[in-house]
Amino acid sequence: MRIDAYNKISQVYQANNIQKLTRSVSASGKDKLEISSTAKDYQTAKQVLSQTPDVREDKINAIKAQMQSGTYNINMEEVASHIVDKYFEKTI
């Protein structure tokens, strides 16, 4: 059994040779943020959508006026077709 090799192994694990790190002074020290043109477009679209009402009052008022005057006609075949389409979309 060789005991003299123990000293060499222990030297590998010793932390006597700590190297000091120097910081680079040439860095500007300021962070920089750039927003892409796509992100700017999304931001603009989001602002426009937030200003747009969820309900289109002009269409609602026009349909209400037609219903009150009795001129609002609905094609029952189209309504039935849409109901059947929605039913099969959910079941498939």
Image (cartoon, rainbow, N blue to C red):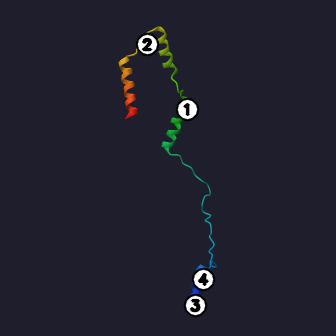
| Coordinates of residue 12 in the picture (x, y in percent) | 58, 81
> Marks 1 and 4, how far apart in space?
68 Å
User: Which is more toward the observer, 23 or 45?
Assistant: 45
| Coordinates of residue 22 in the picture (x, y in percent) | 62, 69
User: Which is more toward the observer, 56 or 27?
Assistant: 56
Residue at 48% from the left image edge and 19% from the top image edge: 59
Q: How crowded is mark 2: few (under 14 residues within 10 Å), some or many (20 or more)?
A: few
Q: Is mark 2 on a helix, strand or loop?
A: loop
Q: What residue type is labelled 2?
A: Tyr
Q: In the picture, which quadrant includes the N terminus?
A: bottom right
**Residue identifier under label 1:** 50
Residue, far front: 91
Foreground tag (1 vs 4): 4
Q: Which amino acid does label 1 sit on?
A: Ser
Q: In the picture, which quadrant includes the C terminus?
A: top left
Residue at 43% from the left image edge and 12% from the top image edge: 72
Mark sitting earlier along the chain (1/2): 1
Q: What element carries label 1?
A: helix
Residue at 49% from the left image edge and 10% from the top image edge: 68
> Marks 3 and 4, how far apart in space?
11 Å
Specify whether 77 is left or right of 42.
left
Residue, far top: 69
**Residue identifier under label 4:** 10
Q: Which amino acid does label 3 sit on?
A: Asp
Residue at 62% from the left image edge and 64% from the top image edge: 25
Looking at the rendered structure, which numbered label has been put on residue 4?
3
| Coordinates of residue 82 in the picture (x, y in percent) | 38, 24
Mark sitting earlier along the chain (2/3): 3
Q: How crowded is mark 4: few (under 14 residues within 10 Å), some or many (20 or more)?
A: few
> Marks 2 and 3, how far apart in space?
104 Å
> Marks 1 and 2, how far apart in space?
32 Å
**Residue identifier under label 2:** 72
